[in-house]
Image (cartoon, rainbow, N blue to C red):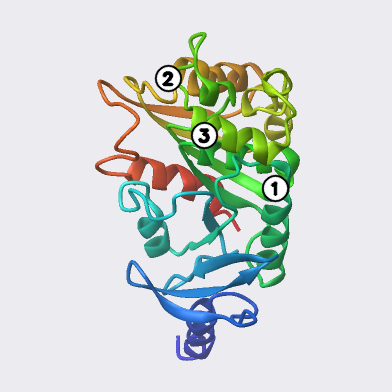
Amino acid sequence: MKRLLPLLTFIVLLSSHVCADTAFPGEKIDEWHGFKRHKFEADGCAAWVVEPKVVLPGLPWSWCMEFPDAFTERCGAPQLLAAGFHHVHIVVGNTFGCPDAVKHFKAFHDLLVAHGLAKRAALIGLSRGGMYAYRFASEHPEDVAVIYGDAPLCDLRTVLGGNGYGKGSAVEWANLTKAYGFKDDAEALAYRGNPVDTLAPLARANVAIIHVIGDADDIVFPAKNSDVIEQRYHQLGGEIQVIHKPGIGHHPHGLDDPQPVVDFILKHAARP
């Protein structure tokens, strides 16, 4: 046993490091929910990486695509950090996962992998963050292990609203069409890069999906978003689990006890 002690000490010390290279150029250090956070610039965007106190083998990580400080305790990020995940975010603005945003996402992903984090991330998509997560995953499925969508937007037509797609928002529709560069509503409505249309690459890459939805959501209607993803992903042979919240609307996101989501992510993204 005495011979094993130096090796065990080395393993524990090694596991306490954020990744292969902890320093990011120009970084500043603060705390996020009791964990050390590295704040820096990546591909021209503000970004950050939160490190766990002890990391899991393989350095798995979760990535909140948008709204990283909304309903945080209910959506599992602190619990994943406590379990040994890193947790990250990059600010791309209110862009609905447009092509330019996906380019920033890819550059950020590759930077973190170069720093030692696992190649395949666990994406967290709250509300319109679902578009961010699915858009990145459909273009780079090899970089994604899990998608956790919480009341996730999965069809841009929901933002316009009407025709069974919900209330919609004229302001957000204007932001969306500008971000994507659509010349008019007709071009936007004909778009076939929505998550509901681009699931096949995810199924081929064995990306696991879990959704948490409020059955009374009248902003991001489940029938036009999560329900479509669930049906089509099953047809493609993909793994998907949906947790329903009866009588709950779009808010609050997450669960009173997010452990089922945390366990799902640990199962599929924490494998060395």
Mark 3 is surrounded, within 10 Å at the Cα level, by few (under 14), some (14 to 19) or many (20 or more) other residues, namely some
Name which of mark 2 and mark 3 comes first in the sequence.
2
In the displayed structure, 123 sits above or below 152; it is below
* Viewer can see residue 206: no
212 and 42: which one is in front? 42
Mark 2 is surrounded, within 10 Å at the Cα level, by few (under 14), some (14 to 19) or many (20 or more) other residues, namely some
Of the residues shown, which amino acid type is indicated by label 1? Val
Secondary structure beneath dot 2 equals: loop
Question: Where is residue 12 drawn, in percent x and y?
Answer: 48, 80
**Residue at image location 66% in from the left, 67% down from the top:** 42
Name which of mark 2 and mark 1 comes first in the sequence.
1
Of the residues shown, which amino acid type is indicated by label 2? Lys
Of the residues shown, which amino acid type is indicated by label 3? Glu
Quadrant housing the C terminus: bottom right
49 and 259: which one is in front? 49
- Specify the quadrant of the image occupied by residue 140: top right
Position of 236 with respect to 224 (left or right) is right
Q: In front of the other: label 2 or label 1? A: 2
**Residue at image location 51% in from the left, 90% down from the top:** 6
Q: Which residue is mark 2?
A: 167
Secondary structure beneath dot 1 equals: helix
Q: Are marks 2 and 1 in contact (CB under 8 Å)?
A: no
Q: Which residue is mark 1?
A: 102
Report, in whole angstroms, how far the alpha carbon at label 2 lies from the one at label 1.
27 Å
Question: Where is residue 91 drawn, in percent x and y?
Answer: 56, 58
- Specify the quadrant of the image occupied by residue 69: bottom left
* Viewer can see residue 263: yes
125 and 4: which one is in front? 125
Q: Which residue is mark 3?
A: 172
